[in-house]
Image (tube, helix red, strand yellow):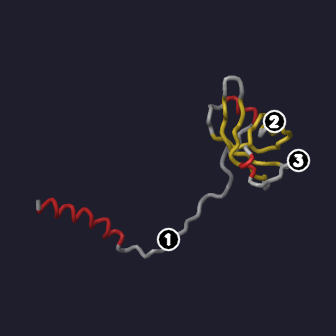
């Protein structure tokens, strides 16, 4: 019994000893700031992706086609996207504003859309 209590005390005190040198200051480190390879998915390639795959599109919302449903266009073609009212984040977007959309591929029996989670203006 004494050995098991002593073992428990030693096991608990080793992590505490490691923290003894902690000064409460954290180090800030940097990272890569360039563009990632193949950062954006083309509209024409969405048809080849699996359901619920997370993607990023860059292009234009060219028209509203229904309740929270829009047509998105990039240099490769068009695709239907669904953007919930809350996901606009207060942005007003016109057909000539280039945007970046992040969301998931949504495959149903007879339809393919992108369920958008985030809309932002393209700063480049």
Q: Mark 3 Cα within 10 Å, few/some/many (few <14, many 20+)? A: few
> Which one is in front, 40 or 109?
109
Residue matched to label 2 = 66
Cα separation between marks 1 and 3: 44 Å
Q: Residue at x 74, y 42 (%)?
A: 83
Q: Position of residue 118 (x, y in %)?
A: 70, 48
Mark whose residue sits in front, 2 or 3: 2
Q: Which of marks 2 and 1 precedes in the sequence?
A: 1
Decide: marks 2, 3 in contact (CB < 8 A)?
no
Mark whose residue sits in front, 1 or 2: 2
Q: Residue at x 82, y 43 (%)?
A: 60
Q: Quarter holding the N terminus?
A: bottom left
- Circle 1 — which element? loop
Q: Mark 2 Cα within 10 Å, few/some/many (few <14, many 20+)? A: few
Looking at the rendered structure, the number of numbered marks drawn on it comes to 3
Decide: marks 1, 2 in contact (CB < 8 A)?
no
- Circle 2 — which element? strand
Q: Quarter holding the C terminus?
A: bottom right
Cα separation between marks 1 and 2: 50 Å
- Circle 3 — which element? loop
Q: Position of residue 50 (x, y in %)?
A: 62, 31
Residue 70 sits in quarter:
top right
Q: Position of residue 68 (x, y in %)?
A: 77, 40
Residue matched to label 3 = 96
Q: Is residue 68 above or below residue 15?
A: above
Q: Residue at x 70, y 42 (%)?
A: 116
Label of residue 26 in the image: 1
């Amino acid at each position: 019994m004494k050995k098991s209590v002593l073992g428990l005390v030693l096991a608990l005190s080793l992590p505490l000893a490691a923290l003894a040198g902690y000064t409460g200051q954290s180090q800030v480190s940097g990272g890569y700031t360039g563009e990632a390879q193949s950062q954006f998915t083309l509209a024409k390639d969405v048809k080849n992706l699996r359901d619920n795959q997370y993607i990023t599109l860059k292009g234009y919302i060219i028209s509203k086609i229904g309740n929270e449903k829009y047509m998105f266009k990039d240099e490769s073609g068009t695709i239907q996207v669904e953007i919930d009212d809350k996901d606009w984040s207060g942005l007003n977007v016109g057909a000539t504003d280039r945007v970046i959309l992040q969301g998931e591929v949504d495959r149903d029996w007879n339809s393919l859309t992108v369920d958008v989670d985030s809309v932002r203006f393209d700063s480049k």
